[in-house]
Amino acid sequence: MTNTDLSAHSCDACRIIDESDGKVDGRMFNLDHWDLSQERMHFKRFRSTQDEITDRVTDFAGSLNFFYIHLAWFIVWITLNTGAFGTHKFDKFPFGLLTMIVSLEAIFLSTLVMVTQNRQAKKLESRSQIDFESNLQSLVWSVHIADKLGVDVKHVEALCAEVLRESRQTN
């Protein structure tokens, strides 16, 4: 059933929900700003090998093992290039080659982290949409149940509106 199918409300609870937004317009909810497409399925269907590799790389880059490997690598590199073991210095101080390698690594890792964060943000948007739809279903059910039980739904709605208004003022 869509919003427009409910224009002729079939019960008191539906009329109460229509009135709860302060505008009696035959619509229970104004969902024009929500994209009700199948976003949640999008992420499962279009998750590519690239996405999996990116997630694995960023997971590893954010681990202590990554830190320890780099710490050991820097110690070995600097030790070898300061001539501590009498070896040939292939990257003399101030370690230009090391600086370039680390800079390139930082560029690639930061890009991968941003790609992962963008994908996670899209997942969160999708989850928010699912939560929103679930909340709407719960609202419709609870108003109908309350109406059948004889609860003064308008009074409860007024109390909820007051509590939400106070909550928003304190935040």
Image (spheres, helix red, strand yellow):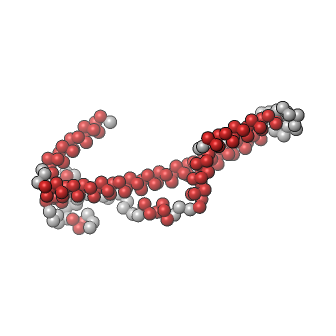
Q: Is residue 155 left or right of residue 93?
A: left
**Residue sitting at x 67%, y 39%:** 68
Q: Quadrant of the C terminus?
A: top left
Q: Is residue 54 above or below residue 97?
A: below
**Residue sitting at x 65%, y 40%:** 67
Q: Is residue 42 left or right of residue 151?
A: right
Q: Is residue 93 above or below residue 24?
A: above
Q: Is residue 120 above or below residue 45?
A: above
Q: Is residue 16 visible?
A: no
Q: Quadrant of the N terminus?
A: bottom left
Q: Position of residue 162 (x, y in %)?
A: 21, 41
Snapshot quadrant of residue 40: bottom left
Snapshot quadrant of residue 64: top right
Q: Position of residue 20 (x, y in %)?
A: 19, 52
How many marks overall? 0
Q: Is residue 116 left or right of residue 23?
A: right
Q: Position of residue 93 (x, y in %)?
A: 80, 33
User: 103 and 147: which one is in front?
Assistant: 147
**Residue sitting at x 53%, y 61%:** 47
Q: Position of residue 4 (x, y in %)?
A: 24, 66
Q: Is residue 2 visible?
A: yes
